[in-house]
Image: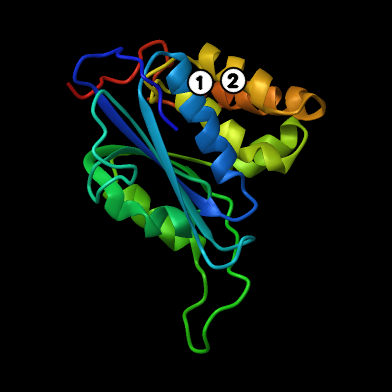
Amino acid sequence: MKDEGTKGEGMKYDILIAGVGGQGVVLASRMLALAAMKAGFRVSTAETIGMSQREGSVSSHIRIGDEIPGSLIPAGQADLLIGLEPAETLRNLPFLKKDGKIIVNSHAIPPASKPPGSPEYDPAALLAFLEAHVQGILCLDFTQLAEEAGTYRAANVAMLGAAAGTGMLPFSREIILAVLETEIPEKHRAVNRAAFEGAIERIKLIPGQPDGEQKVKLNV
């Protein structure tokens, strides 16, 4: 998916979304790509999907920039990693650049099966590792936040709200909301909007988080 806009001379911004099947990784990716295009940026996206459609690993690469050499983000170049599940966030950590940011959903989805003798899934240990090794990290139970808004299925949209509310995106929250109005079916629109806006309000209560009025500083 590409747009021929030319806004932002020499800019680039790479976003990786990671989760498991059924969490709405592809929808979140599409919304970000459409928002970037609506803001006048060129965009390229690509998905990698595991063997199992549901509960298998799913990741989506959103590359925004004047010149995009490929659809997949190379290791160590992602500006932002949005992890819908702790283990999938850690699995994709090698893609994050040295000063990159992470938004991670603390709600874990244990694997449907595991090889005999493999260690127990310990999401708390994974989150502790991420918080110890990544300076720019925002960790919340976005699934619970979305459920409070009306449905746990809106956790992906709540995480987009957090990204917008912390100023981690190169376009405004209003643009994403405009995309939400066209991409989410009408019967689900209100609850997804509530999850998006609820996340923005929640992060305002976290000490040290920016108010989102400033966009990310783009690479030029």
Where is the C terminus found, in terms of image quarters? top left
Identify the residue position indicated by label 2 in the image. 179
Q: Secondary structure at mark 2?
A: helix
Q: Is residue 137 left or right of residue 188?
A: left
Specify the quadrant of the image occupied by residue 168: top left
Q: Is residue 197 above or below residue 91?
A: above
- Residue neighbourhood size for the residue with mark 1, other residues' Cα within 10 Å, grouped as few (<14), some (14–19), many (≥20): some
Q: Is residue 203 above or below residue 135?
A: above
Q: Number of labelled discs? A: 2
Q: Could you tell me which residue is drawn at 62 percent across and 39 percent down?
A: 155
Q: State the image coordinates of residue 182 (x, y, percent, origin top left).
A: 66, 20
Specify the quadrant of the image occupied by residue 171: top left
Q: Is residue 217 above or below residue 23?
A: above
Give the label on residue 204, or none: 1
Q: Could you tell me which residue is drawn at 58 percent across and 69 percent down?
A: 111
Q: Could you tell me which residue is drawn at 67 percent across and 42 percent down?
A: 144
Name which residue type carries label 2: Val
Name which residue type carries label 1: Lys
The residue positioned farthest toward the right in the image shown? 187
Q: State the image coordinates of residue 158 (x, y, percent, origin top left).
A: 59, 32
Q: State the image coordinates of residue 186 (x, y, percent, origin top left).
A: 79, 24
